[in-house]
Amino acid sequence: MKVSEANMKKIDLSRPAFFFIVATRALLGAGIGLLAAGRLRRNRRRQVGLTLVAVGALTTIPAAITLLRSGKAAETKKIAAA
C-alpha cells in the first residue's frame, strides 16, 4: 500500500489576521449550529442563526483576500531569496 504525502503551503500571518480568520470561521459555525439546534424558540433561533451565518459569510471575503495576499507575499519572498 502506497502512502502519499500531502503538500502543504506555509503562510505567514500576523496575529490580528490569524484571529480575524478564526473569528469568521467561529461566527459561521455558531450560526450554523444555532440553526440546527433546538434550545431557543424557533423564531429567535432562526434570526440569530441567520445573522451569525451572514456575518461569518460576509467576513469570509476579506479573510480569503488576507490569506491570498499572505500566500503571494510568501511566494514573492521565496522567489526573491532564490
Image (cartoon, rainbow, N blue to C red):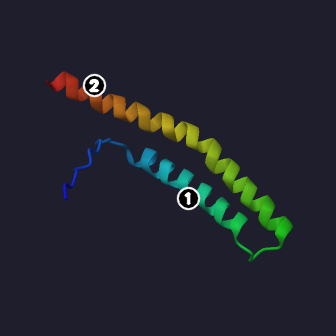
Identify the residue shown where x is 43% and y is 38%. Answer: 67
Total numbered badges shown on the rendered structure: 2
Q: Position of residue 1 (x, y in %)?
A: 19, 59
Residue found farthest to the left = 82
Q: Position of residue 28 (x, y in %)?
A: 61, 55
Picture layout, residue 72 above or below residue 13: above
Identify the residue shown where x is 55% and y is 37%. Answer: 62
Picture layout, residue 51 above or below residue 41: above
**Nearer to me, 15 or 9:** 9
Label placed on residue 26: 1
Real-space Cα separation, disc 1 to disc 2, in angstroms:
30 Å
Q: Quadrant of residue 48?
A: bottom right
Identify the residue shown where x is 67% and y is 49%. Answer: 55
**Label 1 residue SS:** helix
Q: Quadrant of residue 61?
A: top right
Picture layout, residue 44 above or below residue 18: below
**Nearer to me, 74 or 5:** 5
Picture layout, residue 29 above or below residue 58: below
- Which amino acid does the dot numbered 2 rest on? Thr
Q: Position of residue 26 (x, y in %)?
A: 55, 58
Which residue matches tag 2? 76
- Which amino acid does the dot numbered 1 rest on? Ala
Residue found farthest to the bottom = 39
